[in-house]
Image (cartoon, grey):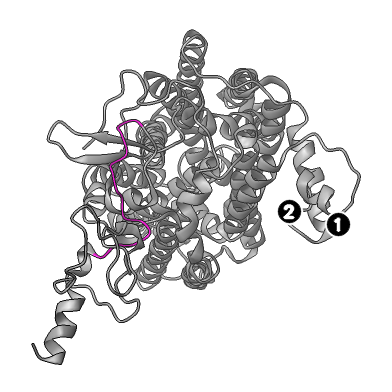
């Protein structure tokens, strides 16, 4: 046997004649184990090894056995299995109906405020009441919007620290009803003729603002509270497919339905402009009052069905103390008991480390919200300056404040399309569309809406008979000023683009405020999100001096650029948060200890 053949034989153990039959060879000639643990084998790309099948390459995430149904998925399963949502509890629809009635009332009243305040009582410019002109009307309606989004902070404190979300909604509903009564009674013809209109209107919008603020900060987190799951779980479908029940998908759907109900309520503007024109403002306000009472009745009758979290005492005060400690010690972990102890600081605090992690997550959301005022500034145009713009065109029997309905119609049409087809298709194709991406898209679509509004304004100015001074004396017919010779329907795409932008920016904002807030601070973080709307209204108030013809055209152009730039800024600053989305959401625990699937739940495959 040649020398090289001997060597080969030795490598294979073939020349070892002295091995006893009972001996078990456990190692090769290089000293390695013959029965190696698969986990100890080299990975592809290490020590010169290459993978013949990249898709099958082993990694740290490779599973040796599948996670049982009802248990939390592993990191590998989260990446590879399809994420689906569950059916919604009945209580979510009750809360959604209450919000529908409140929004019916809010938009039904607010949508006709511009004409109520702007036009005179004599009817020379169409149905009106207070006769304060365009700038006066824009100023008062913008103040109302601003106030309605400041008061949620007060409502959140009342709920989170003292009475809980349900009782807070109930108490503020009573305040709301008082404001509606003031608005209705002072809009009666006899009250307007005796000069009670302006005083009554200002009093009413302040009282209504307190009522709606207290409701707004609590109803959005209350509807998501009705869904108890907070942790992902594995499930096998009847067809044998392993999927992940993802609470974030369900919560996204909850807020899509919630926002749809808001906009079904906003269709009150299909009725109130005609009631304003044909009967009087008082009849429209009376309709809104009756609808709100219906919602309050459902709220009371369903009190035993709702999942209600008790208030947590001084939780908001504790949160501000934590923020102060972060600032004082210049470290975001400074309020943690473990951090204080590690740094030799003898300070007793009423919270634990987990609460600080949740608070840090909420602060991340608040940083994202800091750019939202630009979006709300754009959004606020649809109920103010867009209404005035519509009045500068030929109405052909359509009230100028009726056009606002294309905003909620767009939302009602496109929400089911996104929820039932587009989003599930993206998840099935493993194409991520995380919150920050949706928010950025919302800002960009809003930019398109303002660009289109600027084009419409230009078309008004190049049309007769009044050109860049609409509603001039040359347009008066039978004592009423008419718009320029351009059809009012051309404004429709501007409203629809605003509506589509809301699905991405506004709905995702509600979802982000809920999922990133500590369980005991849901209402307060929601109020922080709503406060950005108030800042947007304040910016709108600052722009009131340029809300005149023809300068308003350039205001629309500027807002288009601002919205697009704000969307780009959000992407630059926060797109890295998309990668942390699941990690941040994992901080929450299920509301109860049912485990597995929610009883009676159905999964949308």
Residue 398 at x, y percent in the picture: 31, 44
On screen, residue 286 above or below 18: above
Q: Is residue 364 visible?
A: yes
Residue 343 at x, y percent in the picture: 85, 55
Residue density around tag 1, few if under 14, some if 14–19, many if 20 or more, within 10 Å? few
The residue nearer to you, when weighing 588 against 393, is 588
SS majority, magenta: loop
Residues rendered magenta in the picture = 57-70
Answer with the quarter of the image where residue 485 lies.
bottom left
Which callout, 1 or 2, points at the residue further toward the start of the chain?
1
**Which residue was labeled with disc 1?**
328
Residue at 21% in and 67% down: 18
Residue 513 at x, y percent in the picture: 55, 44
On screen, residue 516 above or below 598: below
**Disc on res. 333:** 2
Residue density around tag 2, few if under 14, some if 14–19, many if 20 or more, within 10 Å? some
Q: Nearer the viewer, mark 1 or mark 2?
A: 2
The residue nearer to you, when weighing 115 against 28, is 28
Hey, which residue is sitting farthest left in the picture? 1
Q: CA distance from mark 1 to mark 2?
A: 11 Å
On screen, residue 144 above or below 366: above
């Amino acid at each position: 046997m040649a020398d090289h053949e001997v060597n080969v034989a030795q490598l294979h153990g073939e020349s070892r004649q002295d091995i006893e039959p009972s001996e078990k060879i456990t190692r090769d000639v290089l000293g390695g184990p013959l029965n190696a643990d698969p986990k100890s084998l080299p990975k592809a790309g290490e020590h010169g090894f290459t993978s013949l099948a990249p898709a099958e390459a082993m990694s740290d995430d490779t599973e040796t056995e599948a996670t049982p149904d009802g248990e939390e998925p592993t990191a590998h399963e989260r990446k590879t299995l399809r994420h689906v949502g569950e059916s919604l509890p009945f209580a979510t629809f009750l809360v959604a109906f209450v919000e529908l009635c409140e929004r019916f009332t809010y938009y039904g009243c607010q949508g006709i405020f511009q004409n109520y305040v702007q036009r005179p009582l004599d009817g020379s410019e169409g149905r009106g009441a207070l006769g304060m002109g365009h700038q006066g009307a824009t100023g008062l309606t913008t103040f109302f919007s601003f106030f309605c989004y400041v008061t949620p902070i007060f409502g959140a404190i009342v709920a989170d620290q003292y009475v809980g979300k349900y009782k807070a909604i109930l108490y503020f509903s009573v305040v709301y009803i008082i404001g509606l009564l003031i608005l209705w009674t002072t809009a009666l013809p006899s009250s307007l003729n005796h000069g009670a209109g302006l005083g009554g209107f200002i009093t009413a919008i302040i009282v209504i603002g307190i009522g709606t603020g207290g409701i707004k900060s609590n109803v959005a987190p209350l509807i998501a509270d009705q869904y108890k799951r907070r942790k992902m779980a594995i499930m096998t479908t009847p067809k044998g497919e392993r999927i992940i029940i993802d609470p974030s998908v369900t919560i996204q759907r909850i807020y899509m339905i919630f926002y749809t109900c808001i906009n079904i309520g906003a269709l009150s503007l299909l009725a109130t402009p005609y009631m304003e024109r044909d009967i009087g403002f008082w009849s429209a306000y009376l309709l809104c009052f009756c609808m709100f009472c219906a919602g309050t009745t459902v709220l009371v009758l369903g009190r035993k069905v709702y999942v209600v979290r008790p208030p947590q005492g001084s939780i908001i005060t504790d949160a501000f103390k934590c923020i102060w400690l972060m600032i004082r010690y210049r470290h975001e972990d400074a309020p943690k008991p473990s951090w204080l102890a590690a740094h030799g600081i003898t300070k007793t605090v009423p919270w634990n480390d987990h609460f600080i992690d949740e608070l840090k997550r909420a602060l991340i959301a608040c940083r994202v919200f800091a750019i939202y005022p630009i979006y709300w500034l754009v959004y606020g145009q649809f109920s103010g300056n867009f209404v005035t713009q519509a009045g500068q065109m030929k109405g052909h029997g359509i009230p100028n404040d009726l056009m606002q309905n294309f905003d909620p119609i767009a939302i009602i049409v496109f929400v089911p399309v996104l929820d039932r087809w587009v989003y599930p298709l993206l998840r099935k194709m493993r194409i991520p569309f995380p919150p920050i991406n949706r928010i950025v898209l919302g800002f960009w679509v809003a930019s398109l809406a303002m660009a289109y509004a600027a084009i419409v304004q230009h078309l008004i100015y190049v049309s007769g008979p009044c050109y860049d001074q609409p509603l001039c004396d040359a347009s008066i017919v039978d004592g009423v000023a008419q718009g320029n010779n351009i059809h009012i329907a051309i404004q429709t795409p501007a409203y629809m683009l605003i509506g589509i932008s809301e699905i991405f920016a506004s709905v995702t904002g509600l979802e982000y405020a809920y999922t990133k807030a500590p369980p005991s601070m849901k209402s307060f973080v929601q109020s922080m999100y709503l406060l950005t709307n108030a800042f947007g209204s304040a910016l709108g108030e600052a722009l009131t001096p340029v809300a005149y013809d023809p300068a308003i055209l350039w205001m629309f152009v500027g807002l288009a650029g601002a919205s697009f730039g704000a969307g780009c800024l959000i992407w630059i600053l926060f797109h890295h948060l998309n990668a942390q989305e699941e990690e941040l959401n994992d901080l929450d625990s299920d509301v109860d200890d049912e485990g597995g699937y929610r009883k009676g739940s159905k999964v949308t495959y």
